[in-house]
Amino acid sequence: MLSRIADSLYWMSRYVERAENTARLLVSRLPLKTGGGGPDTRGTLGFWEPVLERYGGLSLYYSLYPEPDRTSPVAFLVSDADNPDSIRSSIGRAHENALLARSRISNDLWKTINDMWQTISAVHTPGQTDGISANPAKMIIKASLLFQALTDSTLPHDEGYSFIQAGKLLERASQTSRLLEIGITTPSPTSTTEAADNSRWRALLHSCNAFEAFHKSFPGDPSPARIVEFLLSSASFPRSIRFSLAGLEEHLENLIRWTNPPAAGQALEVTATLLSEIRSPSLREVPPSETSPFLASLNEKLARLNNTIIQTSIFREDHDPDEKSAQEQQQQ
Amino acid sequence: MFHDYSTDGFYDEMFIDSGQPRPHYRRLFEFFRNLDRQAFEQKRSAIGQTFTRQGITFNLYGDPDGTERIFPFDLFPRIIPGGEWNSLTRGLEQRITALNCFLEDVYSRQRILKEGVIPAPYVLGARHFRRECMDVPVARDIRIHVCGTDLIRDAHGTYRVLEDNARCPSGISYMLENRKALERAFPGLFREMGVRPVSDCATELLRVLHHIDPRRSGNPTAALLTPGVYNNAHFEHTFLARQMGIEVVEGCDLVVRDDILYMRTTRGLRRIDVLYRRINDDFLDPEVFRRDSRLGVPGLVRACRAGNLSLANSIGTGVADDKVLYAFVPAMIRFYLGEDPLLSNVQTYLASRGADRSHILENLRHLVVKSANEAGGYGMLMGPVATRREIEEWRRRIKADPRNFIAQPPVTFSRHPTWTGSACEGRHIDFRPFILNGAAITIPAGGLTRVALERDSLVVNSSQGGGSKDTWVLPDGS
């Protein structure tokens, strides 16, 4: 397979996964929004700030929305083309990578990504996001699941498939880690009552699609410590960081077996080290409120792992933006 | 559907006169007359949705948003009777054979120049003449492997060649997708009318690519070179590559080592024997052509010269597209084949010829002036509808660089019933069949009928408000 195509498959998959996670985060938080319409209150802002900080950045947010209202966070996260972490931006890049790898993916898979792009790029009316905002996000979640199913059932499970899986799993690990960070640091929406506190942990579980799975694993013990443990190191829940990294390990092994790209071995080693850290029993003794430094360092390591995978096992040359106009002129 | 349809005095493909269909359209006429409006609209919107979902779209030049649009598609097919098609294909075969002889000749012995049939400066000074390719042989002496010839029908219904596109013509994928869409919309009609299929076109194209394998190994690796996703034909590039089962490569995937072209794969470098390139000559190889190009790959021309690589189409075919040399195609046919041309040109005046030039400059108001080397409907003056200022501007340009301009009397293209959104009206159309030139010449039975969707417009280019129709070729004797 062309190295560039492998690269595109990897990023296509990462961006679809990223969009799905952003969408789920949004949907899980919308019921927590309190109060009616009108201007923003400190409460809602404080509630969104940890999210906005990690999905685009607060300074970008305030420069784009100098007078934010209740709908601004949603617009920023869903449809804002200026926010590189919005769902729209992620799907845009997934779509572009799918175009690059068009000759390698099945027609059904392509249509699914194209549908996602058509849907999300049609959402751009600021001020109208309230009320309708959850719908595009819900559609993205469904389409992403369809994307996973089509990947499994319409593509050969070969090298390309493993690149797709590697992209998805690395992104999933880093997203779950981000969602955990947000869950841990978000202040309660209106008060510090126990009910409000519960609702925030519930939202965290929902944002990872883990609500039911968690309650089945730990019936009657919804303590924050258990929730954090579950999302970090469950051996069986598919969105836990541990589970994602174990999957990544498997696909890196496949790649080594099939084409043995030069530094896949290094990527595999890093993955194995991370896995052993997460499996370590000492991690369980850290109280949830103090997990943040661990998560921050984990995220850094995942970013480095990503660089190892793309810079070494996948050949890549940077695209020059000026190339676009030269490309456009080739026609007859 | 056809109640208020009027031919308005134009040559109409479907109607002899208002209300009276030509014999080969009679069945279609009955069919659409009995189709109720709602069913028609349903089929139309279903096709639109399919095209959008598939991403059968193109980007407009200079559109800052890079907005994707679907290629507008009209539900009424254009029909060509079997006999008419056969004589058309004979003309097209003759033309591509002569054009290929011409290219072989001008890049080697230049007999046609030495014998004075074409004044040498026209060829040697042509913008797309590539002196870098002088005396560089090509596999099997074939230079044009894929040609898209634009034909129109004049006021009397006579087919005339408007231009030959011998560089990298687009449109095969639209022809195939249009067909797929109409087959879904009107499955019964195809069977009943015996419409000839176009579907094995990609197989034929692959056969052509294999035929020019420079190593004659019997199992060459072919790839399609695309400028990238921002090119408005990118859909077509991936479509054709998928149909042929070959890789779509970009310049950054390629590398030349020891005059052999390779692509970078996850298993290492893999040799390419035949490159179906969809990039213009200028951008192919920065060692030889534009130094700033990053779309191609350094060393490509060396690989061709060393006989390690075949390009489809070959470098330098653009000289056959030059609108000045277009005027000489009938002469080429006589010179190389000793035959009379089967297909007519449109009458053409060359601004570089003294007598023609004064005629052009005196009659700008009544002529269509074209630059010799523009494609896509750009660089044209429509005299009859131009403003005084435009006319003067073009007068200045023609005087400054006469070699670069030709003029033709305005030809009215034939019209075809076309859906306008609220009614069925006549719209001007042209026709681009595709000629594949390998071990034999094959012409898929169909092509791209392009339609100017604006009333009275003659501009059929998709970049400027044109749409397309499926083209049905009927069996012999129809």
Image: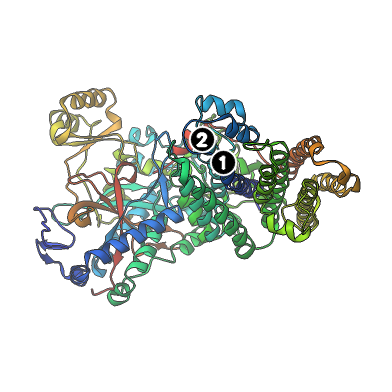
Q: Which chain is home to disc 1?
A: A
Amino acid tagged 2: Arg
Q: Percent position (x, y) of residue B406?
A: 25, 35
> Secondary structure beneath disc 2?
loop
Asked if the residue at tag 2 contacts the one at tag 1, i.e. Cβ–Cβ closer than 8 Å, the answer is yes
- Regarding residue B87, the answer to whether it shows in the image is no
Instruction: Identify the residue shown where x is 54% and y is 24%.
Output: A63
Instruction: Identify the residue shown where x is 66% and y is 49%.
Output: A6
Amino acid tagged 1: Lys
**Relative to the observer, which residue lies in front, B280 or A74?**
A74
Is residue A258 shown above or below B404?
below
* Residue topped by disc 1: A33
Q: CA distance from mark 1 to mark 2?
A: 9 Å
- Regarding residue B128, the answer to whether it shows in the image is yes
Is residue B364 shown above or below A165?
above
* Residue topped by disc 2: A70
Q: Percent position (x, y) of residue B460?
A: 28, 47
Q: Is residue B136 left or right of residue B74?
A: right
Q: How is the image coloured?
A: rainbow
Q: Which chain is home to disc 2?
A: A
The crowding category of the residue bearing disc 1, from other C-alpha atoms within 10 Å (few below 14, some 14 to 19, many at least 20), is some
Residue most toward the front? A193
Q: Is residue A119 left or right of residue B348?
A: right
Earlier residue among tags 1 and 2: 1
Q: Percent position (x, y) of residue A134?
A: 51, 47
Q: Which numbered disc covers residue A17? A: none
Q: Is residue A193 left or right of residue B319?
A: right
* Image quadrant occupied by the N terminus of chain B: bottom left
> Secondary structure beneath disc 1?
loop
Residue most toward the bottom? B192
